[in-house]
Amino acid sequence: MKIYTYPSEAAETRVKAVVKRDIAFDDAMVASVKQILEDVRARGDAALIDYANRFDSPDLTVDELRVTPAEFEAAAGAVDADFMGSLNRATEHIEGFHRQQLRKSWIDTARPGTLLGQMFNPVGAAGVYVPGGQGGNTPLVSSVLMGVIPARIAGVEKICMVTPPTRDGSVNPHMLVAAERVGVDAVYKVGSAWAIAALTYGTETVPGCDVIVGPGNIYVTIAKKIVSGTVGIDMIAGPSEVLVIADDDANPEYTAADLLSQAEHDVLASAILVTDSQKTAEAVQAAVAEQVKQLHRRDIAEKSLADYGAIMVVPDIDAAIDLANKMAPEHLELHIREPFDHLGKIRNAGAVFVGDYTPEPVGDYIAGPNHVLPTAGTARFSSALSVDNFIKKTSIIHYSEAAFRDEAEDIMRLADIEGLGAHANSVRIRLEK
Ligand SMILES: NC(=O)c1ccc[n+]([C@@H]2O[C@H](COP(=O)([O-])OP(=O)(O)OC[C@H]3O[C@@H](n4cnc5c(N)ncnc54)[C@H](O)[C@@H]3O)[C@@H](O)[C@H]2O)c1
Ligand SMILES: N[C@H](CO)Cc1c[nH]c[nH+]1
Ligand SMILES: [Zn+2]
């Protein structure tokens, strides 16, 4: 990882490259995703199978697109009791955290003669994208829980899950067991942009949904961005990111391990260390170089660090926090003395991990908060996946005659200013009654 002095021109260029990396999609990628979306819209299942055969699963047929009861049953027999223990524990924690987010419809009658309020209703159908990697080689089992649990708690009636199939046309058994555990209604073997198209437009096999949630690689992210508005989406939850703020007291081995934990996700992932200590910068640089050699996904981590990694040396911890707020990382770790004294200064981050014993994977798997988080600087305006992403709010408005008469002049005046005579008339006609 390269060490930069921040601020400097070189450091600023790297910051921009990281923050803009999935918004500055290259035109060819966007064009290819648009073409996939149009193709699925026009040809439905036939297009899904063509893409699945080309990218993930050479022999998959239309009849195999939906996971069957027999496949769920076989999956249940293929996982061990230890996995079930961990799955149950994670599920309980995630359910507990998300239950706190449920809100009740409300009405307010404080203003005489009026009744105002909001009704909260779940969307009818949600599509949950679960990343699987090409040919299902990186099955993010934990993302099943993160996508489905909030939808279930919101009360969504129909929850469909999509994920790329493996080369042999199956879905990882741990993923299927997790899906069944949290009450998914159907699982479809489709990945990438064609899965987002299927959930948006519907095909013969895959039903269209009202809302699509879940993280994914650049193709998934571009597709979600394009279909947003036709369906609801949760957020831009693209290639993973971590920004660690560390002082001269931080453990360089821990810090390096945490940076690598996100760098290994994707060649487009980003891992940044910001420190006020040259000694820490150099120690972490050396630890990363050493630890990366041991990784099974070394190539991915090395490319991501080369393209989107950095060690920024800043004058002090306040400057580190300013830089974090500017970059708005998906994950922010604080490896500093008295971290809670600084927490209130953090304004832009998907999730903050505080202290030596809260490495980011605690949040990925088991703590309870959602690990589907905004990336590429979008934590400036969006938040973790939550129950809210599945809820619509409908306003309720009632006026008595007296309340209506009391405010009639105001309504007519505002309508006249807008030049909307029919609006004013709908008030006047009642006053003349
Ligand atoms: N922000 C978050 O909350 C969050 C959470 C978890 C994971 N992630 C990110 O999700 C991503 C998961 O990516 P992944 O690739 O492992 O799984 P994925 O399921 O998102 O993508 C794999 C799919 O993309 C397809 N694909 C490969 N090359 C393609 C091409 N040229 N054109 C179109 N499609 C192509 C594959 O065939 C497969 O179907 C990572 O970037 C990870 O960092 C983000
Ligand atoms: N760190 C990812 C979010 O960027 C989530 C994840 C799932 N599995 C492992 N990690
Ligand atoms: Zn992770």
Image: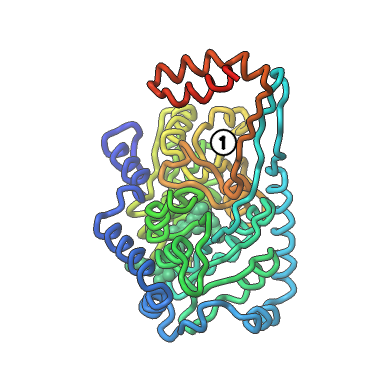
Q: Residue 168: percent from the left, percent from the top?
A: 49, 84
Give above or below for 389 relative to 315.
Answer: below
Q: Residue 412: percent from the left, percent from the top?
A: 49, 17
Q: Is residue 261 visible?
A: no
Q: Is residue 18 left or right of residue 384?
A: left
Q: Is residue 93 left or right of residue 256?
A: right
Residue closest to the eye, 421 or 311: 421
What residue is drawn where x is 34% and y is 45%?
Answer: 20
Image quadrant where residue 120 sits:
top right
Residue closest to the eye, 289 or 314: 314
Q: Residue 119: percent from the left, percent from the top?
A: 66, 40
Give above or below for 225 relative to 182.
Answer: above
Q: Is residue 258 left or right of residue 402?
A: left
Decide: few, some or many residues near mark 1? Use Cα within 10 Å; few <14, some 14-19, many ≥20.
many
Residue closest to the eye, 277 or 423: 423
What residue is drawn where x is 49% and y is 50%?
Answer: 232
> Residue at label 1?
336
Q: Is residue 325 visible?
A: yes
Q: Which image quarter holds the C terminus?
A: top right
- Dot 1: what SS? loop
Residue closest to the eye, 8 or 226: 226
Give above or below for 141 relative to 374.
Answer: below
Ligand 2 is found in the corner quadrant, namely: bottom right
What residue is drawn where x is 61% and y is 35%?
Answer: 395
Image quadrant where residue 250 sits:
top right
